[in-house]
């Protein structure tokens, strides 16, 4: 089994704090947790027999690590875990895995403040698989492009297998997790919302338009979108403005963690793939260093736009534009550079004959090679 890139970070902190490992369902969290030590006790709250063991606190304390999976589905689970930690400490070390975001956890029970470190595991990206597979980087990119980054279909490397997998994957999330965590009954409407979002990848999303399409009110649609974020189906990218309050009032974009399900628009799928790679790198850096990171896009009322702006510790770090074959730098770089001076500007091109750097500092780079090697260096 390949060792995930965040493995050494978690192993280093395992004896210091509770470890909360979150990420999309079936992205490899349980596999990673079981790799940390040869001896472990694994308890999954979805299993009836394991719930009984958890209720009695009758796990094997002689193991090297204790893994609690899907514990956030337990009522008042944070208070329960806090009691275990405060009474027994890390004997053995504890890792809690789950397929819902940390902001979901904050809504339930007592606080774990000061008792945990958080890590977020993403599906495979090109940079990670290039560390572990010997195939040419272009071959690995094509596999990601066709089968997505979730470990099971990626390792199968079969497009038909991926299409069958993704149907059951989304069905499990919507029909099991939504019911377990939120008791949502209108699953059909949320399925329709997911399909609508697929057609809007790369474009700003109007809550009012979605509400009209779904025949629901805008507040209900916003709540559903928040649930889809919390369950790691989509993630939101907001427009950037130095006035943060103003940026929150503008229409965002939504991207899918499973970018390969975007069909019929190669440009949108490519932009989604890059968004996933950038977000994964930002989360990796944030969980490793404690720095604050954010992914935004830039857009004016006149339509000038840059696909992504990476922000580190509230300071703009890098502008990134994604193109399929256009090697000419976007004029939007020149427009935004005066107000974002000193940051790097990169245009990533999927089909590029020759890389180039221009007098204004804009670099045109081969998308595949750049994604395989790019890393943050805020210093």
Image (cartoon, rainbow, N blue to C red):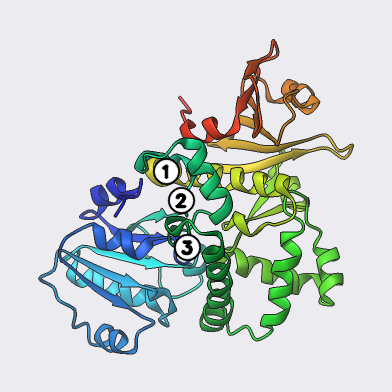
Q: Which residue is mark 3?
A: 102
Q: CA distance from mark 1 to mark 2?
A: 6 Å
Q: Earlier in the sequence, mark 1 or mark 3?
A: 3
Q: Which residue is mark 1?
A: 128
- Regarding mark 1 in the picture, which secondary structure is present there? helix
Q: CA distance from mark 2 to mark 3?
A: 21 Å
Residue lying furthest right: 302
Measured along the vertical axis of the image, is residue 16 above or below residue 222? above
Q: Position of residue 359 (x, y in %)?
A: 69, 10
- Give whichever of 3, 71 is nearer the camera: 3
Quadrant in which the C terminus appears: top left
> Would residue 8 appear left or right of 328 to someone viewing this image?
left
- Regarding mark 2 in the picture, which secondary structure is present there? loop
Do callouts 2 and 3 mark residues in contact (Cβ within 8 Å)? no
> In the image, what residue occupies the spot 46% across and 28% down?
377
Q: Position of residue 358 (x, y in %)?
A: 68, 13
Q: Which residue is mark 2?
A: 124
Q: Position of residue 276 (x, y in %)?
A: 56, 48
- Give whichever of 47, 138 is nearer the camera: 138
Q: Quadrant of residue 370?
A: top right
> Would residue 220 appear left or right of 372 to someone viewing this image?
right
Q: CA distance from mark 1 to mark 3?
A: 24 Å
> Would residue 155 appear left or right of 190 to someone viewing this image?
left
């Amino acid at each position: 089994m390949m060792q995930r890139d965040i493995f050494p970070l978690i192993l280093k902190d395992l004896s210091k704090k509770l470890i909360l490992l979150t990420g999309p369902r079936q992205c490899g969290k349980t596999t990673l947790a079981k790799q940390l030590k040869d001896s472990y006790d694994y308890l999954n709250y979805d299993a009836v027999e394991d719930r009984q063991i958890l209720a009695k606190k009758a796990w094997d304390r002689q193991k090297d690590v204790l893994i609690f999976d899907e514990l956030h589905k337990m009522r008042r689970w944070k208070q329960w875990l806090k009691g275990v930690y405060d009474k027994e400490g890390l004997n053995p070390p504890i890792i809690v895995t789950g397929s819902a975001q940390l902001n979901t956890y904050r809504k339930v029970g007592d606080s774990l403040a000061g008792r945990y470190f958080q890590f977020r595991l993403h599906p495979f990206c090109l940079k990670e698989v290039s560390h572990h597979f010997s195939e040419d980087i272009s071959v690995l990119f094509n596999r990601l492009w066709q089968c997505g980054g979730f470990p099971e279909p990626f390792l199968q490397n079969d497009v038909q297998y991926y299409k069958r997998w993704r149907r059951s994957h989304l069905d499990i999330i919507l029909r099991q997790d939504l019911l377990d965590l939120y008791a949502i009954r209108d699953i059909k409407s949320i399925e329709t919302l997911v399909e609508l979002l697929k057609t809007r990848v790369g474009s700003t999303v109007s809550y009012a338009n979605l509400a009209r399409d779904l025949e629901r009110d805008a507040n209900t649609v916003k709540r559903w979108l928040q649930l889809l974020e919390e369950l790691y189906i989509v993630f939101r990218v907001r427009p950037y403005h130095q006035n943060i309050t103003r940026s929150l009032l503008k229409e965002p974009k939504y991207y899918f963690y499973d970018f390969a399900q975007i069909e019929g628009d190669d440009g949108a799928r490519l932009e989604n793939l890059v968004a996933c790679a950038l977000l994964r790198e930002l989360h990796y850096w944030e969980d490793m260093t404690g720095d604050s990171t954010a992914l935004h896009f830039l857009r004016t009322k006149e339509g000038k736009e840059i696909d992504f702006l990476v922000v580190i510790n509230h300071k703009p770090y890098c502008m990134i534009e994604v193109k399929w074959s256009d090697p000419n730098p976007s004029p939007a770089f020149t427009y935004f550079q005066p107000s974002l001076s000193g940051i790097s500007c990169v245009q990533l091109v999927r089909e590029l004959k020759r890389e180039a750097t221009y007098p204004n500092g804009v670099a045109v780079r081969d998308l595949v090679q750049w994604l395989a090697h790019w890393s943050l260096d805020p210093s």
